[in-house]
């Protein structure tokens, strides 16, 4: 009813010169007409204002049963107008009033009470196209104000963590039209923002936080210059990543006014359509964006779900107040299914499982499958199998029917590859109650695996180096922690010539500066033999270590203590005991860093990372070739006008180099895998991007036995290249295999409902792969080390 009140008072506002509110239970409808009942008496009325001109905009009841009146005041007709707030108690007696200066003509203001009984104010001006947010305390005093750039603010809501979610839209010559979602903390400081671009214009009328912590946004969308709008509904996860979008409409204006999540996880939309007889529409959408039903009514203004599961609708018809009660809808089944493997190959048997489908009465009687290749199946079985004769993307649909003949359908895209990707041989999680992560892994000479990273579960400090040794099946044989009372983090490990291990990273427990490079040498059982720190008074860290052919070690990372810029690439060479032989810095006036180093066939070294000092973009991939004494022989930058960087490099069998990183300059996504192949002088031979519909970050690359390449990293939401399991809406481990020219041969993903990342990949002696990273989908604590072994011997399709 609050929406109805606002809409009606907005109609009256231009006629009001005296701010007056007459409050009664149903007095709002007194001028609609008589229904034969005795009209209510006026309980009380109040006037507010002075010698100037005051106007009411809208009124809201507050948590203390009082009222907040929002309006405007000006001294004279030609004088500037201010926003005026009046707070009353339950009897309409003024408790306080406040004025706030407007920043432009036609300013719009939106007020909402917050959980601390204060108020949030969203304001903007159509003439200077600006948005601002302010927090007002319970007494009307402004606590803070924050600008939010340009655009039109349409909706906001306080979130469960005390922060705020804001929806706005804007248009620029550079980026076209876009909708922007901004999440702030309770102080109004931005935590993240997401921009949704396209050829359409978006207007959000309502935004709600959903039961899963995400958001549902409802409004309208249209094309610029086209004289109609359509219903628009978008669901995002808790980080603002789009999960699905639903649009519908006709040849005229249609828009969503409000959206509410129901107890079954679906959504009820209230909207207006002028495409179909100027009607009020009530639409139910399931949790995956599929329309379940639609009902149309004339002259309905508001609705609410009732305790019995039905709906009550209110409006007016023929000058009478109208109430409509809808009964609880009959039980409707919900169709859901998963399939395995996630990325099938041609002629590979794929299992489709609809056991996640449910019915309120648990009486699903039939499953109708359409596999998208011309084959269908009508069965009572929840699980069936099917194979595809050729590669391609197929739209698979299952329709479930219950004993009342009610039906529901859902569909998913299944992409079939020409080559079947290697399947998981085993996976292991290792960790405690804290945050544990593996950054590096290698197969050891006994056929087992060594991984290194950071543990927050064990050791003596906030984080310690963690070295974990497993057998060939991933079963832990031993683990060791290294560190002090502060934060220590291992980034790289390799087995040394003597059968022991060398670890490199950074330490805040030891050394001379805020953080220093830390090099730790162990024996074959992981017991420390020696350790060394390197660094100055500022922050220094190592990302990669390699044993050189002379038995010493080469470390690469970045330094804030030395060099020419804010941070520089730092290369440190030691002898076999870890004593420094030389160090070199490379960089400009801005931030530069190395992420990976390898010794080359000529005895020198190749480094890859990122630079903000050189190249055309905000950040570019930086490739540096060094001789045996640390002198630069040449360097190359790669990238566009945005942010691009490298995470991993390897010399290839032809003497060139393969680089893996992430690009925001190229590709179809926001962040995409980027693979660059160069000759022996660093000249680009080709590059390829690989992307889904979300954010994709590459962490590691290797050349494979067949001369191709495999990249490992993490992916956000993907429509075709990752199987979208139920609630599988965060990050998954993502592998991409290419031929020697960078053409994709297969891909695979692993993960579930949380954030699952691959930080390193190596090919194993059987032709399979070992992957190390972290998982919070399968964990004992905040996150665990995750080891995944893929089978060897790729299966070629028939």
Image (cartoon, rainbow, N blue to C red):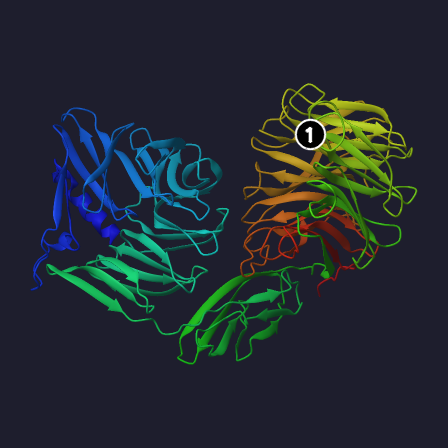
Q: Residue at left 40%, top 45%?
A: 158
How many numbered callouts? 1
Q: Image quadrant for the C terminus?
A: bottom right
Q: Which one is nearer the viewer's eye here, 384 or 554?
A: 554
- Towards the viewer: 244 or 32: 32
**Image quadrant of residue 670?**
top right
On the image, the x and y values in percent for residue 648 come to 72, 39
Residue 279: image x %, image y %? Answer: 23, 59
Q: In this view, does 232 lie above or below 412?
A: above
Q: Mark 1 points at which residue?
A: 593
Residue 557 seen by the camera: no
* Position above or below: 679 against 327: above
Side of 480 relative to 23 (left or right): right
Q: In the image, is 7 to the left or to the right of 544? A: left
Residue 312 appears at what percent x and percent y?
26, 64
Picture quadrant where residue 562 is located: top right
Q: In this view, does 369 lie to the left or right of 44?
A: right
Residue appearing at x 42%, y 42% in the figure? 164
Horizontal and vertical percent position of residue 317? 14, 61
Classify the position of the N terminus by image quarter: bottom left
Q: Which quarter of the figure has residue 500? A: top right
Image: 382 above or below 563: below
């Amino acid at each position: 009813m609050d929406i109805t009140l606002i809409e009606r008072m907005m109609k009256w506002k231009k006629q009001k010169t005296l701010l007056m509110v007459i409050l009664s239970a149903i007095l709002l409808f007194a001028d609609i007409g008589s229904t034969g009942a005795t009209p209510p008496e006026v309980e009380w009325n109040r006037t507010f204002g002075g010698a100037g001109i005051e106007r009411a905009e809208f009124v809201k009841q507050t948590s203390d049963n009082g009222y907040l009146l929002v309006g405007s005041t000006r001294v004279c007709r030609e004088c500037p107008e201010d926003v005026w707030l009046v707070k009353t108690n339950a009897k309409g007696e003024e408790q306080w009033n406040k004025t706030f200066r407007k920043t432009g003509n036609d300013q719009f203001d939106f007020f909402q009470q917050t959980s601390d009984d204060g108020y949030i104010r969203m304001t903007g001006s159509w003439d200077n196209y600006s948005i601002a947010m302010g927090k007002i305390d319970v007494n009307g005093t402004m606590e803070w104000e924050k600008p939010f750039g340009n655009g039109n603010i349409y909706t906001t809501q306080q979130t469960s963590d005390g922060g705020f979610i804001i929806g706005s839209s804007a248009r620029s010559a550079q980026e076209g039209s876009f909708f922007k979602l901004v999440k702030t903390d309770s102080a109004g400081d931005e935590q993240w923002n997401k921009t949704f671009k396209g050829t359409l214009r978006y207007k959000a009328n309502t935004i709600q936080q959903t039961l899963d912590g995400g958001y549902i946004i409802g409004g309208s969308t249209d094309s610029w210059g086209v004289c109609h709008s359509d219903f628009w509904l978008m669901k995002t996860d808790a980080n603002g990543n789009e999960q699905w979008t639903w649009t519908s409409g006709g040849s005229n204006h249609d828009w969503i006014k409000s959206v509410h999540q129901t107890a079954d996880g679906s959504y009820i939309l209230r909207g207006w359509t002028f495409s179909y007889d100027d009607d009020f529409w009530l639409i139910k959408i399931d949790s995956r964006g599929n329309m379940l039903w639609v009902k149309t009514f004339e002259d309905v203004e508001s609705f609410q779900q009732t305790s019995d599961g039905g709906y009550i609708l209110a409006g007016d018809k023929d000058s009478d107040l109208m109430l409509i009660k809808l009964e609880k809808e009959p039980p409707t089944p919900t169709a859901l299914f998963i399939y395995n493997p996630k990325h099938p190959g041609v002629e590979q048997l794929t299992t489709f499982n609809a056991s996640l489908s449910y019915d309120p009465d648990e009486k699903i009687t039939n499953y109708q499958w359409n596999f998208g290749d011309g084959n269908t199946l009508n069965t009572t079985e929840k699980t069936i199998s099917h194979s595809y004769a050729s590669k391609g993307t197929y739209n698979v649909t299952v329709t479930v029917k219950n004993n009342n003949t009610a039906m529901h359908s859902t569909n998913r895209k299944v992409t079939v590859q020409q080559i079947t990707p290697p399947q998981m041989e085993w996976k292991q999680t290792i960790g405690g109650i804290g945050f544990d992560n593996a950054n590096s892994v290698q197969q050891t000479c006994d056929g087992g695996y060594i991984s290194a990273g950071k543990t927050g579960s064990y050791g003596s400090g906030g984080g310690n180096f963690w070295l974990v040794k497993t057998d060939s099946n991933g079963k832990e044989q031993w683990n060791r922690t290294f560190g002090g009372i502060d934060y220590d983090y291992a980034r790289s490990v390799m087995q040394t010539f003597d059968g022991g291990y060398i670890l490199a990273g950074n330490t805040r427990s030891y050394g001379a500066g805020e953080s220093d490079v830390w090099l730790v040498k162990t024996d074959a059982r992981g017991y420390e033999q020696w350790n060394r720190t390197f660094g100055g008074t500022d922050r220094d860290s190592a990302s990669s270590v390699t044993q050189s052919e002379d038995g010493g070690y080469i470390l690469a990372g970045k330094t804030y203590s030395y060099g020419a810029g804010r941070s520089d690439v730092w290369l440190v060479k030691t002898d076999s005991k870890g004593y420094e032989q030389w160090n070199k810095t490379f960089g400009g006036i801005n931030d530069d860093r190395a992420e990976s180093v390898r010794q080359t066939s000529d005895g020198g070294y190749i480094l890859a990372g990122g630079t903000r000092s050189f190249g055309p973009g905000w950040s570019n991939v930086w490739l540096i070739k060094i001789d045996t004494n640390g002198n630069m022989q040449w360097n190359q930058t790669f990238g566009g006008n945005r942010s691009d960087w490298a995470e991993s490099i390897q010399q290839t069998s032809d003497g060139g180099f393969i680089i893996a990183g992430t690009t925001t300059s190229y590709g179809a996504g926001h962040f995409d895998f980027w693979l660059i192949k160069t000759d022996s002088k660093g000249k680009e031979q080709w590059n390829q991007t690989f992307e889904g519909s979300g954010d994709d970050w590459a962490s590691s690359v290797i050349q494979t036995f067949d001369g191709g390449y495999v990249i490992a990293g993490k992916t956000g939401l993907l429509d075709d290249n990752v199987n979208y399991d139920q609630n599988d809406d965060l990050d998954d481990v993502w592998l991409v295999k290419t031929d020697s020219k960078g053409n994709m041969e297969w891909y695979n993903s692993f993960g579930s409902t949380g954030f699952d990342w691959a930080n390193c990949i190596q090919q194993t002696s059987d032709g399979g792969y070992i992957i190390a990273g972290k998982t919070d989908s399968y964990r004992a604590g905040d996150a665990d080390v995750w080891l995944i072994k893929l089978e060897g011997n790729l299966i070629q399709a028939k």
